[in-house]
Image: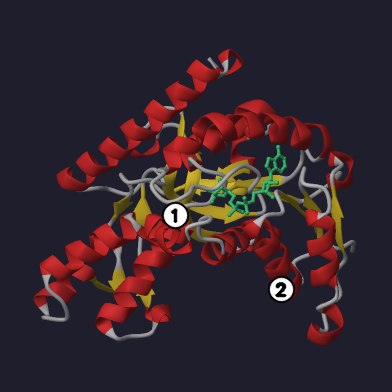
Amino acid sequence: MARPKIALIGAGQIGGTLAHLAALKELGDVVLFDIAEGTPEGKALDIAQTGPVEGIDVKLKGTQSYEDIAGADVCIVTAGVPRKPGMSRDDLLGINLKVMKAVGEGIAANAPDAFVICITNPLDAMVWALREFSGLPREKVCGMAGVLDSARFRHFLSEEFNVSMRDVTAFVLGGHGDTMVPLVRYSTVAGIPLPDLVQMGWTTQDKLDAIVQRTRDGGAEIVGMLKTGSAFYAPATAAIEMAEAYLKDQKRLLPCAAWVDGALGLKGMYVGVPTVIGAGGIERIVDIKMTKDEQAMFEHSVKAVKGLVDACKGIDSSLA
Ligand code: APR
């Protein structure tokens, strides 16, 4: 059987890390596409030369031609600009919307059967626009945010409790922005929900609230440190987990930005929800029950996403 083909649209910080991880895991042959001449070629060659030492058999190619992504099984999109200190993800909307148009058309023409994972920010609006521009089936186009936000939450919780990160599960829903909803009730240490752990004295409600807020600000914290760009190791790792779930038909239950029409009280929009990812792409939306407070936070987040989608329609009339 031929090796799967993974196309990475954008060969910057996240794109390069994606290529390295995909190669290390031998997920398939990798094509790095970027408009910046030399960048994808240089990174592809550099990573290919790790092969003899790592003992991996995958091919890597860098390109400026969309034709080279032909027949890709997975496309991961990071093309666009990242934020700088002081910027919100939403500030990237105008410039990255134009990029999504070019990328959507490139994927539609060359890899219409691919499972597409968007990472470009502002995430929920960009994945919606990418789907509109590409015209691909909605279950084959999704966005990476929930896995990353949950990983950040899990990391902070494991430090607070001094337990292995592997035993901490967490759930973050809603838009990938300041309004995201870390669901404390559905987050656990080895199955023990966080509110129970507060009662058991493992932490205090104030400390937990601070961790929730730090999770919401997780991206900005790193932008503030790096100064020249945004996080790239954890975003790439999160997207690779989603790609692997699709390629290996793992039926993983992962939070991601998916098209929701009916579940969670939503009518036709992209937002962060629990999904099942397998060979069919987004195979299921998990229609969880929320308390009144959780529902209110989720609706606030949904409203913010809708505002960004409306802003896209205002910029590009073909989307209206
Ligand atoms: N087509 C292809 N590539 C493009 C295009 C385009 N139209 N426009 C820009 N690019 C490329 C740039 O040349 C650059 O190499 O996208 C790459 C982006 O890489 P970085 O600037 O290093 O950004 P990165 O940190 O990888 O983040 C990419 O993901 O998390 C989001 O907010 C982040 O929107 C940003 C995206």
Reading the image, the residue beneath label 1 is 146
In which quarter of the view is residue 233 placed? bottom right
Q: Is residue 42 left or right of residue 20?
A: right
Position of 55 relative to 306 (above/below): below
Q: Position of residue 194 (x, y in %)?
A: 22, 69
Q: Is residue 100 left or right of residue 165?
A: right
Earlier along the polypeptide chain: callout 2 or callout 1? 2
Position of 163 relative to 171 (above/below): below
- Report the front residue among 79 and 42: 42
Rendered residue at 89%/63% (across/down): 1
Position of 313 relative to 4 (above/below): above
Q: Is residue 287 left or right of residue 239?
A: left
Q: Position of residue 294 (x, y in %)?
A: 22, 47
Reading the image, the residue beneath label 2 is 25
In which quarter of the view is residue 23 placed? bottom right
Q: Is residue 180 left or right of residue 22?
A: left
Rendered residue at 38%/45% (across/down): 177
Q: Residues within 10 Å of mark 1 (few under 14, many from 20)?
A: many
Residue 65 shows which numbered tag?
A: none
- Report the front residue among 91 and 234: 91
Q: What separation in Å lies between label 2 and label 1 (alpha carbons)?
A: 22 Å
Q: Amino acid at mark 2?
A: Lys
Q: Position of residue 60 (x, y in %)?
A: 85, 63
Q: Amino acid at mark 1?
A: Gly
Q: Position of residue 106 (x, y in %)?
A: 78, 34
Q: Residues within 10 Å of mark 2 (few under 14, many from 20)?
A: few
Rendered residue at 32%/46% (across/down): 178
